[in-house]
Image (tube, coloured by chain):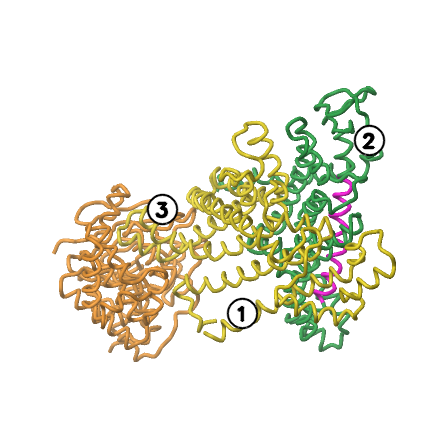
Amino acid sequence: MIGYLVRRLAQAVLLLFGAVTIVFLVLRVIPGDPAALILGSQATAQELAAKRDEMGLSDPLLAQYARHLGEIVRLDFGDSWRLGGDAFAAVLDRLPATITLAGFALLFTLALGFPLGVYAARHKGKLADRAVSYFSLTGQALPAFWVGIMLVLIFSRTLNILPATADGSALALVLPAFTLALPFLGWLARLVRNGTLEELGRDYVRTARSKGLSERVVFNIHVLRNTLTPVITVLGLILGNFIADAVIIEQVFAWPGIGSLMIESIQNRDYAVAEAAIILIAVFYIGLNLVVDLLYFALDPRVTLETV
Amino acid sequence: MSALLEVSGLQVAFGELRAVRGVSLTVGKGQTLAVVGESGSGKSITSLAVMGLLPAQARVVEGEISLDGVNLLDLAPEELRRLRGEELAMIFQDPLSALNPSLTVGYQIAEVFRRRRGASRAVATGRAVEAMAEVGIPDAAERAKAYPHEFSGGMRQRVMIAMALALEPRLLIADEPTTALDVTVQAQILRLLRERQRAGLAMIIISHDLGVVARTAQSVVVMYAGQAVESGTVAEVYGTPAHPYTLGLMAASPSARTGRRGIRPIDGNPPDLTALPSGCAFHPRCPFARERCRTETPALRPLPSGRTSACHFAEEVLAHDRAAGA
Amino acid sequence: MSERSAVRRRLGVGPAVAATVLGLFVLIAVLGPLLLPYDSVATRVGDRLLPPFSTASDGSFALFGTDQNGRDVLRQVIAGSRVSLLVGITVVVVGGLVGLVLGLVAGYYGGWLDAVISRIGDMQLAFPSILLAILLAGALGPSLTNVIVALAVTRWVIFARVVRGSALTTRGREFVESAKVMGASDLRILVHYILPSCVQPLMVASTVQVGLTMVAEAALSFLGLGVPLDQASWGSTIANGRDYLASAWWIAAVPGIALTLVVICIGLLGDRAGDGSAPAKEVAAR
């Protein structure tokens, strides 16, 4: 049991290490001279060379990599040339906004996706079921950033009932959170639908009926309980994707989270901040996957760590 | 002796396919009826029809199922639901899949008292523990908090029995109750069921194991390809089968009385319900088959001493029994 | 029975419609810019922000209106369709080929080769592919080639996984074993026995990925990290239209509708081919 935990944790650390390496490779191997960027176009060749030495850019790649790893372990991503000050601190500063957004999106997904899936299962093969199925397919195919803009067009510019950008009010959360939720809402609905139908066909449902329980009790207590387990575990995956997708959606709604910070940083070649942001997102993504795996054990009484 | 349950001319169809093709059976009050036959013979479907728990694709096309003179097929679903648990109960072959994996067994038994009798959670839990203790589950108060997968097969079947009998129904349908269990546990479960029998519980016990039947039931119905082919008291049917299929089952059964002849499986395979043979469905596998069996479907007909057989040559089969027994 | 076949018949229209829409899209992407060329630098102040169904000052008909520089939106969308198609196809071909080769090698040979390839894939999937694409595209700078490179780098893993899975199952089959016994070379076995088994799943994955890639390209261009501004892309037109939502909604709406339509049609066909199962994989592959 401890063995599994350790193995799973080691795996997560290895993945994170891989993510750090890939980001390092992208940022260091790619054309563009960070020294020139910082000093600007007025700098002389001597000044550039001195800056390069100072930044360690003339060292062999492997040495740079080793040093970089050490820095990242200490959460030292360097300073932001654009914002001034520590890059990691700048990212942490924006983290709460992203977490709030992803949290609300998760709420939307659950509150709408779950009932929709149950409804589709109860009306299997009927119009409602096919509608949910098409909605699921469409929701996943839609370009979310465009949907966000269209929601702004409808609810902010035309109907004028919801703010288009973060204005500090709670209402400002509605459009970005819904945009983020939309692709997963349909996906969850379909997952719940299929899970529910599968559970409905199981023997224990027949047993529950043989006890003379009402259909309502059979469904709400016996079936839903078993449908819920895979749903809860998948919520972690969805949350991880929200934090990733927020990178684009935040840009649409000028939401002050790590996503928009990352894009601004990349657009301005402020790679220290961009790297800190992307690594933090990777940490969340990998961490949530880990939590999902562990949750699975906690929720399903049949699965014990010994059986893995 | 008046009948508790009387099924007559029952036909059940899955779409175009007839899984049960005219079955009649009677269970007297406090009596135990065994239904035997190979898998696919329609015995489980018959019992599910009695419970009103047929799968959604299946429907009763003909026949009558009367409990105490009331035709269950005329009842509204809600009325039938109230009879389940209260009058009719059922236990299944595989208690692991028949129990909800994510609810404790205590909850699953207690909910019968809560939902059907309006008992409070505490009272219901207490009654569930009593019910578990009654079927011989040691340390019931503690075990009630455990999940189905944490029980052994035999203990799980005891849980099922406790649950089915919680509301003291008059008829218990046991569908292969011991098939998934090893021999010693089988004996314990059967002993438990026989105790309940003595307390006045009527049962339908479905099994392909003739030994189980012999030790539990008073009368027996043999099913083949969705039809009853022979019925009578256990002693008669076992002692002198009046249908070649029953004869074959006896020869194929290790634990039946006739085991001394050695185990000899019935030739051929159970029939494909979508393409039944003409005439008697058993004729391709029957050592007694003649031309008449290919063309004329035999009706279930009474023989002397109140038993029935659906064989054109039942008398010949009986004569064969006597010759072999001598 | 009849109810089910009725449902099937109703569903049966979907793929036909989808295929027609996609055929039209390809035709427009290939021929459209020749018939209705788009000039990104031409500005006609007099024709600014004309609504759909207007007539421009030179007498031309602006079906989908004009943007803030008086450029025709329809022409922009047609030019954008070319970029979209080009990126979608090229990325899937390049990523698909790389994935095919690495997946075959990993699945057939197994051992350390498989371990290395699979671990690199795992690491790459450790963070969402769109992030890696944004980072790469941002670092490489805006150009059509760079967009293709950035997206192909993020997509190969998905193809490699699909191919590896098929190769792994086929490798253990009896006919492969007997071919080995007969002394067939690895290359021969790979090409004649393993490869054919991977084609179908690879085609299903490719169909889905063309759609996802087109959305990803639009997203990159929307963020200003995709194709340069002098080339029209649906994403950059949408980004441009965002600033004029209140006065000229059509600039952002029309390219988005085009993109949505194409992607849904691809999804419909892919769903058909892949039976739409395994939604968990869809999320993992995003």
User: Considering depth in this image, is C222 or A203 the residue closer to the camera?
Assistant: C222
Reading the image, the residue beneath label 2 is: C36
Tell me the mark number nearer the camera, choosing from 2 and 3.
2
Reading the image, the residue beneath label 1 is: A9
Element under disc 2: loop
Mark 1 — on which chain does it sit? Answer: A
Question: Magenta span has B279?
Answer: no
Quarter-wise, where is residue A74 in the image?
bottom right
Mark 2 — on which chain does it sit? Answer: C
Marks 2 and 1: in contact by CB < 8 Å? no
Residue type at numbered disc 3: Arg
Residue sitting at x 20%, y 50%: B118
Residue sitting at x 53%, y 59%: A288
Query: Residue A238 at what x, y percent from top left?
Result: 53, 53
A230 relative to A166 in the view: left or right? left
Chain in orange (letter): B
Q: 10 Å neighbourhood of mark 3: few (<14), some, or many (≥20)?
A: some
Q: 10 Å neighbourhood of mark 1: few (<14), some, or many (≥20)?
A: some
Q: Give the label on residue B59, or none.
A: 3
Element under disc 1: helix
Evaluate whether residue B107 shows in this view.
yes
C264 relative to C151 in the view: left or right? left
Magenta stretch bounds:
C81-104
Q: Colour of chain A?
A: yellow
Query: Residue A255 at what x, y percent from top left?
Result: 59, 43
Chain in green (letter): C
Tell me the mark number nearer the camera, choosing from 1 and 2.
1
Residue type at numbered disc 2: Leu
Evaluate whether residue B248 shows in this view.
no
